[in-house]
Image (tube, rainbow, N blue to C red):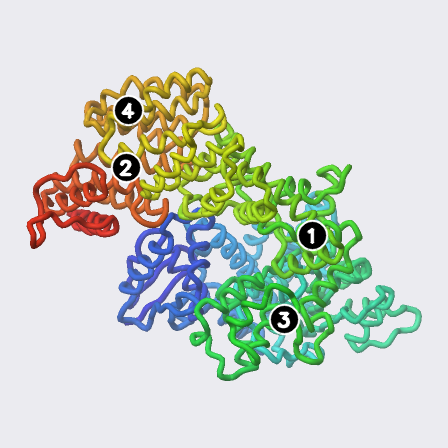
Amino acid sequence: MSVEFRLFGEVEALVNGQRLDVGHARQRCVLASMLVDVNRPVSVDQLVDRVWADQPPSRARNALAGYLSRLRALLAGGNVAITRGPAGYTLTADRDRVDLHLFRRMADAARAAAEPGEATTRFQQALALWRGDPFSGMETPWFADMRNALVAERLSVFLDRNDVALQAGRHTEIIAELESALHAHPLDERLAGQTMLAQFRSGRQADALDLYRRTRERLIDELGVDPSPVLRDVHRQILDADATPPPRPPVKTVARPVGRPANLPRRPTSFIGRADQLAAVTAAVMDGPLITLTGVGGVGKTRLALEVAERAHSHFADGASVCELAPVADGATLGQTVAAGLGLQERPGLGVEGTVIEHLREHNLLLLVDNCEHVLDSAAGFIDRVTRDCPRVTVLATSREPLAVAGERVIPVAPLPDHEATALFADRAKAGRPDFDLDAEPVGAVAEICRRLDGVPLAIELAAARTRMMNSLDIARRLDGLRLLSGNARGGHPRHQSVTATIDWSYRLLAEREQALFDRLSVFAGSFDLEAAHGVCADDGDSELDTLELLSGLVDKSMVTIRGGPAVTRYAVLETLRAYGRDRLQDRGLREHYETRHALYFVDLIERGATGVRGPDEKAWIERLAPTAGTTVTSPDTENIRVAFDRVLADGDTDSVMRMVASVCELMQMRVGYTSTDWVDRAIGVADPGHRLFAEVIGVAARKAWVLGEFAEARALALRAAGRTPAPGHTYLGYPGDVPADTAVSEGDPDTALRYYQAQIGTAKAAGDLSRLVWVLYQITVAHDARGEPKAGLPAAQEAMRAARTTQNPSTLAMACCAMGRCLKNTDPDRALAYLDEAIGHAGPVQNNWLTGIARMEAAATRTMHADPAEVAPEFIEVLDHWAKAGPGTGSQHWFAIRFVAKLLERLGAAEEAAALHRAFAAAGQESARGDGVVDDRGAPTALTGAQALALARSTLRRFCGS
């Protein structure tokens, strides 16, 4: 069976020439992602990012595994395999059976062809593979970036084809294509020059001259520049009627591959990863006069630049040359260094730099200028002259900050992703210890090393070198400081002999105030925004704009990285840089001071957030503090909050500890983030009964225990409050007295809960606390529903709706809608479902996973009574999965769901399974068991545990999903 793949245009697979249905859009995205990296492993994280970007579903990994399994089955029988290894999934196939890779191989063969006519034919064959823009219909950021890079790559091939076609005298064959392409790229001077030559050689001199006039006017009007010397040269040739024999191509000359240029150094180690970026930078080199690779020291800018030069040098008639600026101590001697790198002697009357410029003006060359940051002004001035005066030279520069000259295209070089970092560690470790086996190392140790070193190649290589003396687990245990990361190969530049030396090199280039801010930023445990940087690190009297200016300088110099945020820009410092900054703070005796400032800032922030989520601005606060709540609360500031809590707890600052814990109920727990708040339990041990927030802290801890199904613990905690209640307006969920009432409902005694919450109505109204009032009325509807009379709660639900509309708070509105849906589910199911859908609409955008789950569960329960029960089975599986995010074990909402599932199974005829679920419910103390069902050897019903009940519910529901 012959299988071909097409990525140009719509993604397709063809088996023996016939199109294969490869599934829906997401599955095609997975296939395309694998084909781009055919025969190379792609990590699960990479695939999730490519397919879903920053909005993956809650079970993205499971969905991904399903897509790959179906693709594996579809493609079975051909020479195609999808396998999984330590580094990720690999799709193995003949690269020439994928149009993208065939296109690249054919383009390379065309560039290597000796004769222009042969090269033209080969280029034509490569271009004929394009059926349209790549990955048609796939719009995630990764696919959009890849599409743009490939379109640029195609344009480069198209322009190279034009050059050789003009050399071969085939201008009449391509002139129509050239004129059409120029409409799409009217400012491309290389294309304009090619079109002018083709028109002139076709006897259309007037058209060629008119095209030059229009192009010149457009360049001046839109870019404010005159035509380049190359385009002016073509114009002059046409005016002089001197276009035969054909002149050199306007920008790039396609030549036979030359041998390795004398000063393009051999790389003694293999190049790991960065395939996408290597292709993108290579395409950029083909298209622009100046490309600058920026990034933190040790991230691999030089190595990437050398690999690009290796790949691209055959496209330049005079190859590639490298100028290494690291040894240059004074920018005034830069010209001599470049001249020496090019093997030039100063010409009389020109000066050193003039000699270099005159030499480059006559050559078609890729010039790699490495390590510009410490002589930035001099390097920028020199490179600016080259790009302006040497039209056939392309400069590829590396620097820790941009050069800021006209025409510069800046490409940041990021640390390696996890799977590539792991592969690099294994490769370098094996070089020093041939018996090194990644699979034999302690599980997760190498991944932990790479994670803590932020994927920075230099740091990873230095750590890997230590495998000669210790295993990876020993290395991971010793990474707290930077001393271990030293001792690179002899002969390297001193700054590459240790991570500390590399950072020193960058640190010394900072201004004094930039150094101070960099040191202070090391107290952040994760990313941070401008407000936090200013609040924690600013000097007295500094404005936020002062902090922004200093922070911008650190970003420009690659000491701080920018990370996208849902609402505001966020920044981060790599872990190795943070360790260096902490050492500097320690040396200055300032570490404790700024760690305390950091902790107190986040104590204040979480308190402000707890107040903010109760008002109309709930969404903004959730995006900042809990945007991906679920099994764990992983907000942008999660680690900062944890570190702040640890700090105030260690300092014995009980007031700050209790302020933080009292703030998490509505802020985090309603987002279903219970398992991440282990510090709530730690706070209980130091909680001061005399503190003003003692009742709130007890209420938060008791609520957590109730949600996790730990009812005895929940009651015991609530009793510690001794009847005390939170101050009005601080929380509506963290009342200790609520927890025994809610437990009573779970255990089959709704009357106790009803009496309690009815007594709370007057208190909430007297305090003017509308959010608390809505919560109380909501719980009254829960109690009526548990009594089997949901409609009796309708007056409470209606009052809750009126109060919620006044608050304009999304979660409060969702709560009221859930109450209305619950009360109407028996008598008016259509209205009930409408209210429940509205609840999801309010709760979803603010990540209120608690109320989203309630609404989905009540909607499924409503459909159980009024729709085809078989259609409801998949909904309940999703509900059970949703509540699994709340934490380990069988939580309170799991038991509510199990009760609903039992009723559904009764309708589906699964009486035995329904009875087993009822018995499990009763055994957990939920309500009295029914008398029917399986019995043990002594005649007593056998009850399932919570985990067994959930497994039975899921497996039975799955039986009915397709029926």
- Residue to which mark 1 is pinned: 591
Tell me: 687 left or right of 672: right
- Residue to which mark 2 is pinned: 857
Q: SS at mark 4?
A: helix
Q: x, y (%) of residue 868?
A: 16, 37
Question: Few, some or many C-alpha atoms within 10 Å of disc 3 (few <14, some 14-19, many ≥20)?
Answer: some
Q: Residue furthest right?
A: 349
Q: SS at mark 1?
A: helix
Residue 490, compared with residue 93, is above or below; it is below
Q: CA distance from mark 4 to mark 1?
A: 54 Å
Tell me: 81 left or right of 328: left
Disc nearest the viewer among 3 and 4: 4
Q: CA distance from mark 3 to mark 1?
A: 22 Å
Disc nearest the viewer among 3 and 1: 1
- Residue to which mark 4 is pinned: 754
- Residue to which mark 3 is pinned: 484
Quadrant of the snapshot with the N terminus: bottom left
Label located before the other in sequence (3 or 4) = 3
Q: CA distance from mark 3 to mark 2?
A: 54 Å
Residue 532, compared with residue 148, is above or below; it is above
Disc nearest the viewer among 2 and 4: 4
Q: SS at mark 3?
A: loop
Q: CA distance from mark 3 to mark 4?
A: 64 Å
Three-letter amino acid code at the position of disc 3: Leu
Label located before the other in sequence (3 or 1) = 3
Residue shown at 41% from the left, 63% from the top: 34
Disc nearest the viewer among 3 and 2: 3
Question: Few, some or many C-alpha atoms within 10 Å of disc 2 (few <14, some 14-19, many ≥20)?
Answer: many
Label located before the other in sequence (2 or 4) = 4
